[in-house]
Image (cartoon, rainbow, N blue to C red):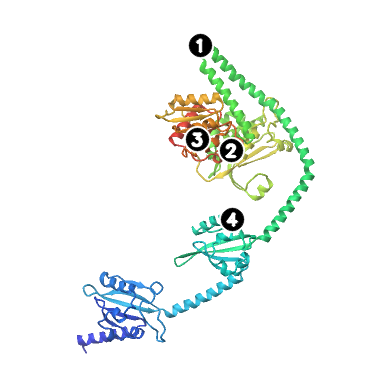
């Protein structure tokens, strides 16, 4: 049987009407002018108005003065712009005056969406009952608050809740007992009022409000209502409720612990005093022994160092005398040869001085990231020439070797010294092996070896097949001036220099030796997490770029010869050179308005030292670049610990080319 179209439409309308009234939410259909077309049975029950009575009327007519502005705006957006909106009860309470079947206020969410297309656009408003869910949430919150109150009231530690201004909003009974106030008296007080030194709290408060997490409690001194002091440890955390920020602070009483610590400290102090009294005689005996050892060392120094220095000075003075004579005679063809001879002797003297400073750990280092494999490979030809044809050389480099941070020149010198010692220990020939490897020194090793920090190291091992050493020699091998060589053939500084260099580089040296079986010396240098530095070559003096117009350098040096030398180098390169003989005179120039592009200063100056001068100068010239000149450092300074950004260091004695290149690169800002 065929159904008539009108009959079909009638069935569809009846079906839609049944579904419209059967859904468990409120449905309202509005026309393009916001008039009610119909609403379902659920909404008729909740509003108390039938759909027939509502048809053709606006919501603000049906609910005069009770329709929320947010709902009106959402309906307008749906009809005018085709936009959908969800209005929740938490942000838009009491959107419509609805009631449950029991007569209670009906808490609801409202969604608004367009129906159809323009120009016949309509609007569907759906109302969802969330009354039961809200009531459950309220019950849950009340239970949580009850549990929170129980914890707060029974906690032995003081607990305070503060607002974003640092004002106390909540205090538990323990806080009242701790500070001597009634709980209601604490509420409304600023936290800083309760502390003896509020500056500590102010710094902590700023950090907490910025969102930083406290990883350990901070000790503060509380000021009780009666004026007495109490020591507390405070932990605090920031939290947020809706848009408001709060901080909860827990304060623990540490008065008993501090009293116990003080008693223990007093006990230790008296114990130390008793021990000190009993060991004074031993200390005096050790001092006498140490003085005797120093005198013995000085005697060895005069036999070795003085001999070497006399030879070096003879070469320098003799060459200079010949230069003066030949120049006076007008015979200048051999002057360059005498200059090279004097320079060679001077460089050997400088190397000897560096070795003296190295074993004393007072030689300024210029640490750089170093790949030990590349450095040793570059030394191979020199090492082979040094040990001679009687001795075989094997170099074993580890794959994936870590980078270390040290002074590459001093590392080369240390390896060369050890190679020479190995050669001398194999007078009939033998084999020298140089190996590299990654090493991890654990806590057990550090416990067994003093002054060793556990961690990752790069190990450089130098092994020979020579005569070896007995235990009594091994114990003294790193002592300054100690040598087994005849008088005049060694200063006893080689191994001392290696030891001093390793310690100054925060590393370690270990020796293994047995008579007749050879010796192995391991240098451990800390791992550096970074790429090795690229080698740079020093330009000849004639190749150094000249100054640009007006560039000015201030030289502060108390030694007139060195100061004049630097001034002449600067003037030859076109710089405007200013000079001062001590710190106060240099500071006076630096405080003047004249242009200064670079400060070149000795570290050890009379009056104020070079670093103090640089710090004082940067108070007015914050971007002033500083080049320190030093040959000795009181605190065995490392370049990466003594220098701030914009500061560099060059060690005496230095080549004129190196000084000129360093000055140019600093002014141009390339380093």
> In 3D space, how far apart are the residues under numbered discs 3 and 4 (Cα atoms)?
40 Å
Q: Secondary structure at mark 2?
A: loop
Name the foreground residue: 510 vs 317.
317
| Left or right placement of residue 138 versus residue 226 in this view | left
Name the foreground residue: 61 vs 266.
61
Q: Is residue 262 above or below residue 102?
A: above
Pointer 3 local density, CA inside 10 Å: few below 14, some 14–19, many at least 20: many
Q: Are marks 3 and 2 in contact (CB under 8 Å)?
A: no
> Which quadrant of the view contains residue 545?
top left
Query: Is tag 3's residue or tag 4's residue first in the polypeptide sequence?
Result: 4
> In 3D space, how far apart are the residues under numbered discs 4 and 2 (Cα atoms)?
37 Å
The residue identified by callout 4 is 197
Locate residue 446, reporting x and y percent: 66, 47
| Left or right placement of residue 454 versus residue 619 in this view | right
Closer mark to the observer between disc 4 and disc 1 = 4
> In 3D space, how far apart are the residues under numbered discs 3 and 1 (Cα atoms)?
43 Å
The residue identified by callout 1 is 331
The residue identified by callout 2 is 637
The residue identified by callout 3 is 626
Query: Is tag 4's residue or tag 1's residue first in the polypeptide sequence?
Result: 4
Quadrant holding the N terminus: bottom left
Q: Secondary structure at mark 1?
A: loop
Residue at the (57%, 24%) spot, across then down: 346
Locate residue 635, reporting x and y percent: 61, 38
Q: Are marks 3 and 4 in contact (CB under 8 Å)?
A: no
Asked if one can make out residue 614 in the rendered structure from this viewpoint, the answer is: yes
Label tally: 4
Query: Is tag 2's residue or tag 1's residue first in the polypeptide sequence?
Result: 1
Locate residue 129, reporting x and y percent: 39, 80
| Left or right placement of residue 479 versus residue 653 in this view | right
> Which quadrant of the view contains residue 132?
bottom left
Query: Is tag 3's residue or tag 2's residue first in the polypeptide sequence?
Result: 3
């Amino acid at each position: 049987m065929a159904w008539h179209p009108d009959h079909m439409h009638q069935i569809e309308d009846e079906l839609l009407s049944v579904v419209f009234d059967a859904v468990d939410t409120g449905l309202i259909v509005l026309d393009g002018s916001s008039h009610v077309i119909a609403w379902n049975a659920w909404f008729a029950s909740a509003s108390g108005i039938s759909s027939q009575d509502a048809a053709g009327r606006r919501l603000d007519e049906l609910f005069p003065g009770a329709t929320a502005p947010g709902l009106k705006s959402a309906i307008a957006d749906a009809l005018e712009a085709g936009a959908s909106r969800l209005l929740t009860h938490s942000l838009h309470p009491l959107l419509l005056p609805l009631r449950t079947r029991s007569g209670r206020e009906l808490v609801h969410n409202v969604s608004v969406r367009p129906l159809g297309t323009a120009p016949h656009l309509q609007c569907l408003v759906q109302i969802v009952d969330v009354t039961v869910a809200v009531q459950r949430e309220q019950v849950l919150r009340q239970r949580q608050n009850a549990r929170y109150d129980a914890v707060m009231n029974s906690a032995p530690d003081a607990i305070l809740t503060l607002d974003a201004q640092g004002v106390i909003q909540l205090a538990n009974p323990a806080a009242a007992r701790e500070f001597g106030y009634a709980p209601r008296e604490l509420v409304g007080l600023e936290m800083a009022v309760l502390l003896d030194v509020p500056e500590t709290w102010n710094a902590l408060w700023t950090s907490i409000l910025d969102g930083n997490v406290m990883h350990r409690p901070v000790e503060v001194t509380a000021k009780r209502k009666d004026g007495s002091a109490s020591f507390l440890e405070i932990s605090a955390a920031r939290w947020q409720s809706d848009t408001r920020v709060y901080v909860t602070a827990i304060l623990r009483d540490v008065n008993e612990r501090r009293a116990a610590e003080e008693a223990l400290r007093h006990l230790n102090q008296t114990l130390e005093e008793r021990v000190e009294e009993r060991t004074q005689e031993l200390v005096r005996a050790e001092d006498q022994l140490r003085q005797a050892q120093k005198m013995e060392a000085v005697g060895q120094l005069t036999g070795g160092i003085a001999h070497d220095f006399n030879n070096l000075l003879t070469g320098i003075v003799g060459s200079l005398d010949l230069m003066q004579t030949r120049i006076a005679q007008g015979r200048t063809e051999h002057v360059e040869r005498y200059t090279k001879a004097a320079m060679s002797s001077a460089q050997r003297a400088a190397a000897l001085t560096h070795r003296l400073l190295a074993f004393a750990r007072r030689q300024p280092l210029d640490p750089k990231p170093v790949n030990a494999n590349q450095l040793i490979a570059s030394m191979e030809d020199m090492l082979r020439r040094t040990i001679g044809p009687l001795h075989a050389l094997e170099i074993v480099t580890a794959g994936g070797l870590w980078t270390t941070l040290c002074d590459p020149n001093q590392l080369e010198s240390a390896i060369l010294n050890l190679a020479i010692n190995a050669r001398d220990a194999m007078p009939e020939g033998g084999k020298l092996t140089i190996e590299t490897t990654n090493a991890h020194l654990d806590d057990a090793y550090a416990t067994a070896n003093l002054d060793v920090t556990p961690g990752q190291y790069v190990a450089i091992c130098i092994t020979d097949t020579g005569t070896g050493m007995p235990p009594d020699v091994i114990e003294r091998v790193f002592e300054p001036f100690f040598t087994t060589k005849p008088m005049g053939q060694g200063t006893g500084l080689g191994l001392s220099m290696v030891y001093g260099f390793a310690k100054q580089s925060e590393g370690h040296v270990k020796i293994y030796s047995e008579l007749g079986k050879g010796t192995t010396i391991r240098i451990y240098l800390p791992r550096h997490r970074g790429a090795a530095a690229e080698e740079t070559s020093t330009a000849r003096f004639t190749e150094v770029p000249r100054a640009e117009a007006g560039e000015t350098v201030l030289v502060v040096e108390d030694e007139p010869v060195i100061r004049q030398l630097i001034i002449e180098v600067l003037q030859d390169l076109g710089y405007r050179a200013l000079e001062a003989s001590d710190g106060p005179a240099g500071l006076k120039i630096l405080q003047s308005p004249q242009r200064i592009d670079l400060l070149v200063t000795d570290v050890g100056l009379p009056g104020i030292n070079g670093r103090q001068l640089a710090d004082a100068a940067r108070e007015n010239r914050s971007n002033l670049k500083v080049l320190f000149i030093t040959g000795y450092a009181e605190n065995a300074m490392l370049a990466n610990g003594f220098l701030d950004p914009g500061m560099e260091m060059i060690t005496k004695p230095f080549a004129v080319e190196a000084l000129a290149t360093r000055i140019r690169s600093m002014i141009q800002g390339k380093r």
